[in-house]
Structures are given as structure tokens and as C-alpha cells.
């Protein structure tokens, strides 16, 4: 990677915010672009809480993706912070990647977003995502519907799939040319600006959401208590190591703690097992993971707790 010549005169670099309704596939696209799991994804809406930056360095450009939580109607203090953080990010980046759900006709939420972005003078590239789910015979009609919605020749529309990667190269190419001329913003060999602890806690939160579905969604947070390298000592003289991770899962109610732990601890074991496997991929080595569950009533409404857990204020 480091052999890329960022000294070429037409090299481009900049920040790209992914904007879109919850669950359209923003995090999946970021992961596909960068080729590693950075942003957590799940079938449950609004999984992305923190603003994650993922960095893609190509021979032509360095793209710093800012993954945002979906824009939606706020219900809690946490919800308000998510929406505020998405709106703020629009003013802080060079290009917007507007992600729309290509497998459905445009709706009111899409019109809201298009109008929100039209009010800003910022380049916008559109990803019609989940194109793998669109029948061949519907494709022309669908593109026409979205062109009518967008009603601008300045915004290019790309059909793509964050799952298969189809169409992503063209998307990257065109986002790249919309960025200002400039050199690297980050070292060319890194893919995330998040500390390892945040990435680790997000992997646990993802497993909680995947395994518990509707019961838990937003009332869970994860705090990494300790990360330590420990000798494995499988045999005498063995110097290999594994990483020990101790983490606490915070919930709001006793009933939620019950669900998370499960019968005889079965659920917590499933969550831990899933998270451990993902962590091993991220760390590239063996991981030992110990999870605790703690009840903190109403943590979502407590500004101090939100800040401690890394959710930025307004
Ligand atoms: P976000 O809320 O916009 O970040 O959405 P996620 O990236 O978390 O994705 C939401 C769900 O849509 C997940 O279940 C993904 O697997 C799924 N998904 C994302 N992109 C695609 C795609 O291109 N095709 C299909 N079939 N599913 C996708
Ligand atoms: Mg997301």
C-alpha cells in the first residue's frame, strides 16, 4: 500500500459521508469498499451509533468514509443525538454518498433526504443499493423513478450491491473524481481511525443485536473493561500469545439482563462465541473473551453515560 505515489499532481483526497435512511446498507457498503469489517451491520435498523471513519487508499485517491446513523424521527435523547450527528456531518465533508434502497420505489423519506441535500452546495453521488434484489425486468423502471425523484443532472446514480460488491468500483471511481486535489489525509496503510476498543465493543454489540433481535435493540451498550496480551503456553517453551478481552454489556432492565444471559447462560455464550470469532479476524490471532452483563436503568437518557460510552454530544 505504502508504495502508492500520493505525490502525483492529480491525486485527490477527502471526506465522504454516507447518508441514508436506516437499514439501506450504508455500513455494508463501507465494509465492502474498505474490504474489512469496520462498521457493524445488522438486519435491525439503526445499528450504527458512532460516526466511524473508514479509509480507502487507491492509486488515484484517498477516500475517508464517514458512516453515519440513519436519518429518522427521533424518539429518545439517543435518537436525537443520532440525527443531529448525521446533519452535522453533511457540513463537514467534501462529498455525500446518498444511499437509497434500489429494491424499493422511492418514498417520502427519500424525498426528504434529496431536498435536505439540495439545500447544500456539495457534490452528491447516489448509490442505488441492494440492486441484487431487483428483477431484471424492473430495473429500467426503477432507475427512471429515482431519476425523476432526484431531478438533477449533477447527481450521478450508480446501481450497486454492498453484499456482492457489484457496481462498487464504478462508484469509487466517480466519488474519487468529485474530491478535491490533495495528498493523503491519513497514512496510506490504515483503514480505520477508531481505536481498537471501539471496534471490539461494536463487534459485541453486533452479536447482541443479531442474536436477540427485537427484544433488546437500543437499550444495549458495550464497554470494554480491559484488553490484555496473555501467553498461550500450549506446550513448554511456547511463546505465542492470545488477546484477552473483558467487556461489560449494559442494559436498562432486569428482564433484558435475563434475555441476554439466557437459559443456563446459553445466550451469553452464543453472543460471546460470535464476537470472539469476529475479533480473531480483526486482531488476526487467538482471542479469549469474557462478558459481564450490568443493569444501568435509563442509560440512554443520561448525558454523562452517553458521553462515557462515546456518543458525541451536539
Ligand atoms: P445501514 O443501517 O444503512 O448501515 O444498513 P446495514 O449496512 O446495517 O444493512 C442493513 C441490512 O441490509 C443488512 O441485513 C445487510 O446485510 C443488508 N444489505 C446491505 N446491503 C445489501 C445489498 O446490497 N443487497 C442485499 N440483498 N442486502 C443488503
Ligand atoms: Mg449502519
Image (cartoon, rainbow, N blue to C red):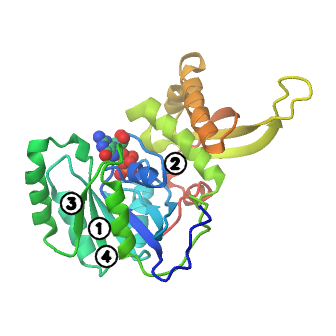
Residue where numbered disc 2 is placed: 36
Distance (Cα) linking label 1 and label 2: 23 Å
Position of 130 relative to 275 (above/below): below
SS type, badge 2: loop
Across and down, in percent, residue 285 comes to: 69, 37
SS type, badge 1: strand
Distance (Cα) linking label 2 and label 3: 29 Å
Q: Which of the 4 quarters of the picture holds residue 18?
A: bottom left
- Of marks 1 and 2, which one's residue comes earlier in the chain? 2
Q: With 208 as the anchor, is 160 left or right in this view?
A: left
Residue at x 57% of width, y 27% of height: 268
Q: Quadrant of the N terminus?
A: bottom right
Across and down, in percent, residue 174 comes to: 33, 68
The reply to whether the residue tagged 3 has its Cβ within 8 angstroms of ligand 1 is no
Comparing labels 3 and 1, the label whose residue is closer to the camera: 1
Residue at x 50% of width, y 35% of height: 208
Label placed on residue 123: 4
Residue where numbered disc 3 is placed: 110
Distance (Cα) linking label 3 and label 1: 14 Å
- Of marks 3 and 1, which one's residue comes earlier in the chain? 3
Do tag 1 and tag 4 residues touch (Cβ < 8 Å)?
A: yes
Amino acid at each position: 500500500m505504502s508504495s502508492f505515489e500520493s505525490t502525483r499532481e492529480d491525486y485527490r483526497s477527502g471526506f465522504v459521508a454516507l447518508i441514508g435512511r436506516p437499514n439501506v446498507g450504508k455500513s455494508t457498503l463501507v465494509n465492502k469498499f474498505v474490504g474489512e469489517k469496520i462498521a457493524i451491520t445488522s438486519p435491525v435498523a439503526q445499528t450504527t451509533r458512532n460516526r466511524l471513519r473508514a479509509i480507502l487508499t487507491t492509486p488515484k485517491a484517498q477516500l475517508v468514509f464517514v458512516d453515519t446513523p440513519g436519518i429518522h424521527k427521533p424518539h429518545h435523547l439517543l435518537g436525537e443525538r443520532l440525527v443531529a450527528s448525521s446533519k452535522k456531518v453533511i457540513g463537514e465533508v467534501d462529498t455525500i454518498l446518498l444511499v437509497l434502497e434500489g429494491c424499493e420505489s422511492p418514498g417520502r423519506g427519500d424525498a426528504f433526504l434529496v431536498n435536505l441535500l439540495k439545500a447544500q452546495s456539495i457534490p452528491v453521488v447516489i448509490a442505488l443499493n441492494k440492486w441484487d434484489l431487483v428483477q431484471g425486468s424492473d430495473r429500467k423502471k426503477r432507475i427512471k423513478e429515482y431519476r425523476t425523484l432526484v431531478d438533477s443532472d449533477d447527481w450521478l446514480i450508480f446501481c450497486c450491491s454492498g453484499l456482492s460488491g457489484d457496481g462498487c468500483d464504478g462508484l469509487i471511481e466517480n466519488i474519487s473524481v468529485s474530491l478535491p486535489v490533495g495528498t493523503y489525509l491519513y497514512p496510506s496503510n490504515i483503514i480505520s481511525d477508531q481505536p481498537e476498543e471501539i471496534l471490539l465493543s461494536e463487534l459485541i454489540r453486533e452479536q447482541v443485536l443479531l442474536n436477540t433481535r427485537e427484544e433488546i435493540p437500543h437499550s444495549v451498550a458495550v464497554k470494554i473493561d480491559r484488553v490484555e496480551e496473555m501467553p498461550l503456553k500450549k506446550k513448554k517453551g511456547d511463546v505465542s500469545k492470545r488477546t484477552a478481552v473483558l467487556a461489560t454489556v449494559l442494559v436498562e432492565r432486569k428482564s433484558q439482563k435475563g434475555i441476554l444471559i439466557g437459559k443456563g447462560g446459553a445466550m451469553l455464550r452464543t453472543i460471546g462465541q460470535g464476537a470472539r470469532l469476529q475479533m480473531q479476524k480483526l486482531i488476526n490471532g487467538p482471542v479469549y473473551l469474557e462478558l459481564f452483563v450490568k443493569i444501568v436503568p435509563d442509560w440512554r437518557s443520561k448525558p454523562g453515560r452517553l458521553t462515557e460510552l462515546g456518543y458525541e454530544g451536539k
